[in-house]
Image (cartoon, coloured by chain):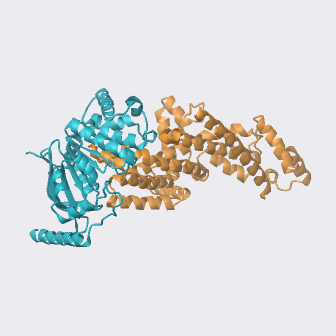
Chain colours: A cyan, B orange
Amino acid sequence: MSAFLEIDTLSAVLHGSSQRLLRSVRLTVDRGEVRGLVGESGAGKSMIGKAVLGILPAAVRIVEGIIRLDGHDILAMPASERRRVIGATAALIPQDPLTALNPSRRIGPQITNRLVDILGWSKAAAKTRALELLDEVHIDAPERVMASYPHELSGGMRQRVLIASAFAANPKLVIADEPTTALDVTVQKQILKLIREMQARHDTAMLFVTHDLGVVSKVCQKLTVLYAGKVVEDTAVAAFFEAPQHPYSKALLAATPKYTDPFASLLPVHESVIASANAEITAADQEWRHGR
Amino acid sequence: MILLRALLTRLATTVVTLFGAAVIVFFVIRVVPGNPIAMMLPPGATDEDIARLSAHYGLDRSIPEQFAIWFAGVLHGDFGASISLRQPVMPLVLGRLPATLELAIFALVLAVMIGGAAALTGTRLRNTRTEAAIDIANGVGLSVPDFLWALVLILLFGILVPVFHISGRISPSADLPFVTQFYVFESILRLRFDLWWDLLQHMFMPALALAIPLAAIIGQLLKQSLKETMHLDYVVLARTKGYAENKVIVSEALPNAVLPTLTLIGVQFTFLIGGTVIIERLFSYEGLGNMAIDAVINRDLPLIQGIVLVFALLFTVVNLVVDMTYALLNPRLRHA
């Protein structure tokens, strides 16, 4: 057993349809490794994160595959046990810090509740831990922030709180679901730096979901490119930026705007690339149906 | 400080509201047909008798003049005397108010319990047949008014299967040790649980009739808000922390989803108090509403005025309490 998170041939369909949303996805995240998960909107990148955390919408059904989290085959577990394993080993840094905190509750309990209710810590120990974490995410007055309500904090502050909350229970896997998309550009950079810093300090495995290849180059060591719910490339980040293998990956990389040449017009992914990628998907689907 | 100022503002508007209510009811009941004097004298009374009695009650003066006299009395705490009962109005009204308050509050508690249970169950079992059944029950509860529910309950549980009391406030044979009119409250203080139980049994049917439509509204609105809240990011985040579904619904979603329902309960509770008038009549429950109907039948002008003022005061107090609770539950409002 090497990888901390192993996803193997994971397929999911929309309830009442045979159309696959995830197409035999295979990916691993090792301890201490950050894996980027990129793709266009609707490619299923967030869905993979949700599947791992057990929060898929009711309309999405997993039809095959294995998700192994710290050696536990979580899909084979009874729901209550799965919840406990996920709560104890994994954590989410959500996309929108404005909606991810409970508006009617103070920040303190929102950080400590998992420690106290799920992991059985004492309240005092959980509070000490929360203060420690708020300090780690560079919040100046942790006591005051703990006593605040979410609406009293800025977006950047809230994302710091959520990052602290995610790392509070010493998770072995953190899933960051586009954690900077909802933030101001000036704040994005700081938060990105903070996430990398926290990941390195806690030596956590991390699945970093994003559509931004620039972010991937700064944060990740490994990269999975997703197209229509299918993995089209799985490689090291350095290798990817040097020479992407799949035509879709190549086109995606070429379409990324470059700060070095601000006047260059944006390149769309060429139609022929889309067509060939779609043909590949159709072929894979046919083979899959045949195999069942 | 801010809270104090808000409170004072509310107090001022309450005074204006009560004055408006007093003016309107005073004039309206004098303009509509019907004459208290005619109700008091035997048939064949002479015009002279009528004139003398009218003068005795001051009804021979112009309406604005009557209002000035009455209002001057109110400012001194004198609400006049009931024409039909020949007693001062305020002691009469305050003597009946507790019975109505206890009935209304019991009905509210029932409505919140039934509606809340329906909403929580419907959310837990969303998109199942149970939820559909709850929706249908809510629809039926909503579309039948409280006085029809009262008749249904009387027929079902008072006559067909006589398991509940359908008349009065307490068994007539009961020996009452009470010094206040808050019987339910006082029976608990005196540890007379036998009387307490007897009171609740008498209140159950009228309270349920009042509660069913409100329970249906609460059930429907709260379930709707809960289901919307269940998709919000912070609720989903709580799930990833390892919380079970029930816990997620009750401690994450409910405190936020309950706010619109709370406002609605405030508005609907005043309707419920209004509903006690007819319900008390149907169940011969000796409360303010039952007295109000007698007062109207007898054209007892001072008593009607007194009752309406007390009802108006009750409504404004209820609204004030709701706003306070709202501010307490929603931290975003506390600083506003």
Q: Report the front residue among A284 and B116.
A: A284
Residue A94 coordinates in the image, percent (x, y): 32, 47
Coordinates of residue A64 in the picture (x, y in percent): 15, 60
Q: What residue do we see at 41% from left, 36% from top?
A: A106
Asked whether B293 or B21 is in front, the reply is B21
The structure residue drawn at horizontal position 55% and vertical position 51%, both measured from the top left corner, is B268
Screen quadrant of the C terminus of chain B: top right
Residue A268 in the figure: left or right of residue B200: left
Near-viewer residue (B225 or A217): A217
Q: Is residue B112 left or right of residue B173?
A: left
| Residue at 21%, 64% in the rendered image | A248
Single out the residue that lies furthest toward the right: B48
Q: How many marks?
A: 0
- Residue at left offset 78%, top offset 59%: B33
Q: Position of residue B269 (x, y in %)?
A: 55, 48
Q: Does the image show residue A99?
A: no
Decide if residue B172 is on the left or right side of residue A286. right
Q: Nearer the viewer, residue A245 or B281?
A: A245
Q: Is residue A192 visible?
A: yes
| Position above or below: B117 against B327 | below
The image quarter containing residue B97 is top right
Residue A34, given in percent of the width and then of the height, sits at 20, 46
Relative to B74, say whether A7 is above or below. Answer: below
Residue A115 figure quarter: top left
Q: Residue furthest left?
A: A1
Is the N terminus of chain B in the top left, top right, bottom left or bottom right quadrant? top right
